[in-house]
Amino acid sequence: MSNALSHSQPKIIAIANQKGGVGKTTTSINLGAALAKTGYRVLLVDLDPQGNASTGLGIGSEKRISTTYDLLVHDASLSEVIQATAVEDMDIIPATTDLSSADIELLANEKRSFLLHDALRQPAISSYDYDYVLIDCPPSLNILTVNAMVAAHSVLVPLQSEFFALEGLSQLMMTVREVRETANSGLRIEGIVLTMYDKRNNLSQMVEADARENLGDLVFKTVIPRNVRVSEAPSYAMPVVDYDPNSKGSLAYFEVARELVSRHNSLKTKV
Ligand code: ADP
Ligand code: MG
């Protein structure tokens, strides 16, 4: 079944923020699963050597035979590295710690920033009929994150609702600008999603007000609340949208998915 953006090429979205622990992986897993459950076909690319997205979706290390590392460094084909997950309509390319050496191994490769771009544009991609490819980036602005930005149509930035949240953003935007100037002129900012929001905490409200004032419509209307069910779900190797579909965290991710899709649809009608 596909609600489909009726396409041959999927929308590719890099989920990036060079800070660790801000909700990139949680957003990749749960936005991906929410999109899959709303009728879209989704591929999640785990681009973090820590492999948390793989673990969180039940792809243990014994199942990570062919990985993102093989895709980037050994020219593996998509069919070698893509695996189904327990979530219907959601596949993954898993990651292992091998990926942490990619930086150095790729130094001599002049196409090093384009490896993921080229991999995701293998003609075989169309046979999977994906609507969305989400890339879970590592917590740094290294060559892996640059690969994600070169491959992507847009960048989605999870922002933790805490003090200093906006500070790292200018560095991230600088990297986006560099990628636009050198490799991917069409790269857009998909938006900012506030994560781990605690409405009883003044600080969360201040960060939200600050973000909306400075970044306007780029900030998704939906905020992701801090919710213990969200943090429990990965230990059951499930997205929260399966683990506890009616939890606040799950409902918020469904809402972010809806917002994302409606943004794309309104963009399409403008063209
Ligand atoms: P990143 O990928 O940016 O490093 P994660 O997605 O791994 O960040 O999140 C960091 C930690 O915060 C994880 O333990 C995760 O379970 C927890 N977490 C993320 N989002 C929420 C949330 N909305 N409510 C509660 N805990 C969350
Ligand atoms: Mg992560």
Image: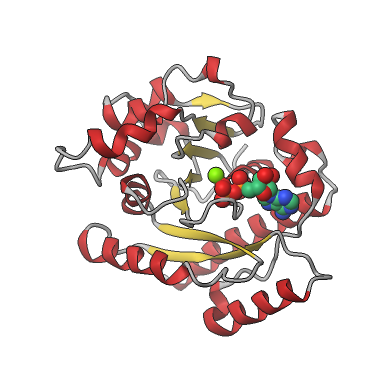
Q: Position of residue 188 (x, y in %)?
A: 40, 65
Question: What quarter of the picture does the N terminus occupy?
Answer: top right
Front residue of 108/89: it is: 108
Q: Could you tell me which residue is drawn at 31 percent across and 68 percent down?
A: 177
Q: Give the quarter of the image for residue 124.
A: top left
Name above or below for residue 80 compared with residue 242: above
Q: Could you tell me which residue is drawn at 46 percent across and 45 percent down?
A: 138
Front residue of 246/58: it is: 58
Name above or below for residue 251 compared with residue 48: below
Q: Position of residue 141 (x, y in %)?
A: 37, 54
Q: Is residue 104 left or right of residue 80?
A: left
Does the rendering let one see residue 185? no
Question: What quarter of the picture does the C terminus occupy?
Answer: bottom left
Does the rendering let one see residue 87? yes
Q: Is residue 89 left or right of residue 125?
A: right
Name above or below for residue 95 compared with residue 212: above
Q: Could you tell me which residue is drawn at 27 percent across and 65 percent down?
A: 178
Front residue of 19/134: it is: 19
Q: How many marks?
A: 0
Q: Position of residue 114 (x, y in %)?
A: 25, 45
Name above or below for residue 101 compared with residue 260: above
Q: Could you tell me which residue is drawn at 31 percent across and 52 percent down?
A: 150
Q: Position of residue 15 (x, y in %)?
A: 50, 52
Residue, far front = 163
Q: Is residue 35 left or right of residue 67?
A: right
